Amino acid sequence: MEASAAAGSSAAAAAAAARTLRWAGRAGHLGGVPRAVVFAAVGAFAKLYASMLNTTTVHNADALRRLVSGRPPGTPLLTVSNHMSTVDDPLMWGFKGFPTSDAKLGRWVLTAEDICFKNVFMSYMFRLGKCIPITRGGGIYQQHMNEALDVLGNGGWLHSFPEGKIAQDDQPIRRLKWGTASLIVRAPITPIVLPIVHSGFEKVMPEKSFFGRRPPVPLCGKKIDIIVGEPIEFDMPGLKQAASKVPHDSSSERKGWPTITPDGLDEGAQRWLYQKMSDKIQSVMERLRKTVLNSKQH
């Protein structure tokens, strides 16, 4: 039975690999031409909707531009934002003056596997667009998270929606999933963490407006506000030291978590550390959200 279970697991892994087409996301795939074409097309689409068909105001845009194109070589960038529609990415990068169509500078982004990787064609296109599939319910130590760590380890730019789902109601930032915090902790080089909060994409692509469904194309004539914060500082040595003193609670152990990390943190310490960091990111994002609301009221 163990042999059959192992065979079944291997077959499932092979099927997942065939569906997610990681090889298509490599920079050298066919000389980088398909990726460049996709970024040019998607970038033009984003510019059209963000800069021409809708009105987009970006606060502190220079901070984002500077970190995307001018941060020290080998330094990874991790941007985090709220998630209000299926078109947040790529439209949020389509504002004037941003290198949206540059495939080399373009972000990698964590995307839902069950939505963006449904078949081989979609997998291929999203891979060319530098998307990393994340399996819902797969946990923060799932295999695909290693791809995200590779991006950060190579000094790349990764974007995450840490709320984990779309929320179109105008409510405070929801409790964040721990995956983003785990990437910060486990990255070979601690990334620069830049928070971004936006408003208006829920009107560009409302979930229930076209016979109770999303419209077939994004809507026009809407006002979009984007605010870029300042990098969030984490005292990683201090946080890890504090986490190491957390009492171990075996009753809350989760399947798939390492018993001990390379930093010597057991599961209880990991949980404390990820929650602490997630709370800080959530707090910063909520302050930005309130700033956006205040700017819209004046």
Image (cartoon, rainbow, N blue to C red):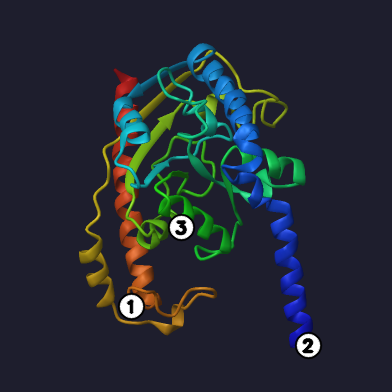
Q: Which mark is residue 187?
A: none
Q: Measured along the vertical axis of the image, is residue 52 above or below residue 60?
A: above
How many numbered marks have been drawn onto this rendered protein structure?
Answer: 3
Crowding around mark 2 (Cα neighbors within 10 Å: few <14, some 14 to 19, many 20+) is few
Q: Could you say which is closer to the camera, residue 112 or residue 166? A: 112
Instruction: Let me know if residue 175 appears in the view.
Output: no
Question: Residue under circle 2?
Answer: 1
The answer for how far apart the CA atoms under marks 2 and 3 are is 33 Å
131 left or right, relative to 72 = right
Kindly identify the amino acid type of the residue bearing the numbered disc 2.
Met
- Residue 288 position in % (x across, y down): 31, 36
1 left or right, relative to 204 = right
Question: Residue under circle 1?
Answer: 264
Q: Which mark is residue 179?
A: 3
Q: Callout 3: helix, strand or loop?
A: helix
Q: Callout 2: helix, strand or loop?
A: loop
Q: Which of marks 3 and 2 precedes in the sequence? A: 2
The answer for how far apart the CA atoms under marks 2 and 1 are is 35 Å
